[in-house]
């Protein structure tokens, strides 16, 4: 078996105040960036910094700040403890999101209404977002679409930045968000684009959203200014995700290579 199926002695020792000595550590499937285990009623995540990407950072301090700051708002799990390279939070019983985009739109709207958390990093927005993506994007992509100026104005919000199907747990019809390793204060249109991304849907759910599902999601998200901004920035937002897919494909990830044309088509639509 691969050695990373099991927690290190150091991690076990760090979790002793939270986890009984004889607890069973069950490696959880689905994580693409970090090592994740189920231990009784907790999820324990050990971070692997080398798995970060330019689009999706992998920061244990950011996850700790997000779970602490969002405690009680109903869309994130309760943090139980953390260390320099790990975090533990309550396991959320339920199923990964598979269909009905309406609860996801509502959960993101709740997140985007929360007070800003000063400890979170500031992500680029608007034209700065486009310029930042061009710095790290692979050179063989089609040109990044232009942004029409002026864009619909909007205040920065707390954003999850990675609301893909594998990071959404459904409980009694409500969507909860997990894997908060790359939150920021930034552009809420970014969260909409990641959820609507055909590449991310194919990678995590095995199917892209239908036009009906896209329409349902946009109709259920209550902030029309954010919707207008997403539509104005759609080409750039999905081009960034295409760049991420190309970046991953360049590292030998064949599934990202297969997903890349889907995102390129979305960016060009």
Image (cartoon, rainbow, N blue to C red):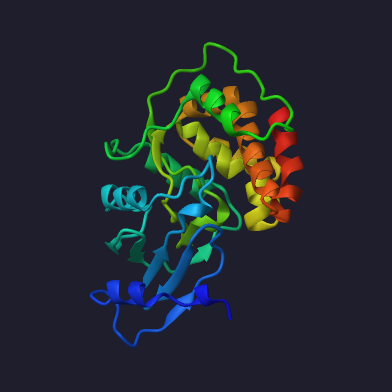
Q: Position of residue 24 (x, y in %)?
A: 41, 84
- Using the image as rendered, state which of residue 268 and residue 224 is in the foreground: 268
Q: Residue at x 58, y 33 (%)?
A: 136
- Residue 16, image x, y percentages: 26, 77
**Which quadrant does the N terminus fall into?**
bottom right
Residue 235, percent from left and from top: 65, 27
Residue at the image point whose x is 51% and y is 26% from the top: 129
**Residue depicted at 28% across the width and 39% down the height:** 117
Please identify the residue farthest to the bottom as the structure is shown.
Answer: 22
Q: Nearer the viewer, residue 38 or 151?
A: 38
State which quadrant residue 30 falls in: bottom right
Residue 51 location (% of width, % of height): 52, 53
Instruction: Give the residue drawn at x 27%, y 47%.
Output: 69
Q: Left of 16 or right of it: where is 34?
A: right
Seen from the viewer's position, the closer of residues 169 and 45 is 45
Left or right of 248, for residue 116: left
Q: Is 105 above or below relative to 98?
A: above
Q: Where's the C terminus, which quadrant?
A: top right
């Amino acid at each position: 078996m691969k050695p990373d199926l099991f927690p290190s002695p150091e991690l076990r020792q760090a979790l002793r105040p939270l986890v009984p000595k004889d607890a069973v550590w069950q490696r959880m499937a689905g994580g693409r960036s970090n090592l994740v285990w189920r231990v009784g009623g907790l999820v324990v995540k050990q971070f692997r910094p080398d798995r970060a990407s330019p689009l999706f950072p992998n920061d244990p301090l950011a996850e700790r700040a997000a779970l602490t700051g969002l405690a009680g708002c109903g869309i994130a799990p309760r943090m139980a403890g953390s260390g320099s390279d790990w975090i533990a939070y309550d396991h959320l019983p339920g199923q990964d999101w598979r269909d009905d985009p309406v609860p996801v739109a509502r959960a993101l709207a709740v997140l985007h209404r929360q007070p800003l958390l000063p400890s979170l990093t500031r992500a680029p927005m608007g034209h700065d977002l486009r310029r930042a993506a061009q710095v790290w994007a692979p050179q063989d992509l089609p040109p990044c679409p232009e942004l029409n100026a002026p864009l619909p104005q909007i205040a920065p919000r707390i954003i999850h930045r990675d609301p893909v199907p594998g990071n959404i747990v459904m409980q009694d019809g409500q969507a909860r968000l997990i894997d908060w390793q790359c939150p920021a204060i930034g552009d809420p249109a970014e969260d909409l684009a990641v959820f609507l991304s055909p590449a991310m849907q194919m990678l995590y759910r095995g199917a892209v959203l239908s036009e009906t599902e896209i329409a349902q999601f946009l109709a259920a998200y209550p902030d029309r200014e954010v919707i207008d901004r997403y539509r104005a920035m759609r080409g750039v937002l999905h081009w960034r995700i295409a760049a991420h897919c190309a970046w991953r494909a360049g590292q030998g990830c064949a599934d990202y290579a297969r997903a890349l044309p889907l995102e390129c088509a979305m960016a060009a639509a």
